[in-house]
Image (cartoon, rainbow, N blue to C red):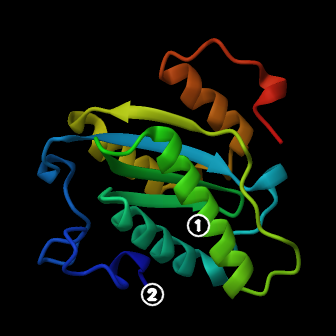
Amino acid sequence: MDWRFQGIIGRNFLQSTGSMINPQDINLPSMLIHVVFSTKHQEPLITEEIRDLLYSFLSGVLEGIHCLVVEIGGTSDHIHLLTSLDVNISLDDYIETVKSRSADWVNDRLNLEVPFAWQESYAAFSVGQWSADELRERIRNQTEIHRHKSFQEEFIELLEENGVDDYDVDELWD
C-alpha cells in the first residue's frame, strides 16, 4: 500500500494524476520547509507494519493545520517531512501539533510494546522550490542512505549543509 494515496485525495494534497503535489503548485502565502526529528532515544519504533498508517495520519494532521504535504519519509527511528508552512501557524505550533498528535495517536491506536514518543529536538529548514525535487529524492531514499550512515550522522550533515554551526552535539539527542 502506498501511504500517499490513503485518505487525502481531493484535499489538494494529490493531483488528479494520483501523484504528490509539485512544490511549484504551492501558492503563497506559505513556504516550503524540511523538518527532521527522531523517535525518543532513536528507538526503531516506526516499523513497516505501522509506517504507512503513521504517514497517512501525519498527512491528515498537516491538512488540519493547512500545510500541504509534498513528501514524507524516513526509517525506523526518524522522519522527514517536506511540507508547506502556512503563514498562520508558527513553526513551534507546527512541530508541537505534529509530534503530540501523532504520538498520542500511535499510543492510543497501535499496540506497541513500549510507549511511543518523539525526541524533543528537531531540525527545520526553509526550502527553495528549485531544490524541492532533489530533497524529495533524498527523502524517498532514506532506507538506502541509512545503510551507510546513522541518523545522527545525517542530522549533523543536514545542519552543516544548511549553515547551522551553532549547536551542541550533546544537546541534540534525548
Q: Which mark is residue 54?
A: none
Is 169 or 134 nearer to us in this picture? 169
Identify the residue at horizontal 38%, vertical 45% (top origin).
89
Say whether residue 58 is visible. Answer: yes
Identify the residue at horizontal 47%, vertical 22% (top origin).
162
The residue that label 2 is drawn on is: 1
Quarter location, residue 167: top right
| 157 over 61 or under it: above or below | above
User: Marks 1 and 2: which is nearer the front?
Assistant: 1
- Rendered location of residue 11, percent (x, y): 22, 74
| 159 over 24 or under it: above or below | above
Q: Amino acid at mark 1?
A: Arg
- Rendered location of residue 71, percent (x, y): 38, 58
Say whether residue 149 is visible. Answer: no
The residue that label 1 is drawn on is: 101
Is 58 or 48 nearer to us in this picture? 58
Q: Secondary structure at mark 1?
A: helix
**C-alpha gap between disc 1 and disc 2:** 23 Å
| 122 over 82 or under it: above or below | above
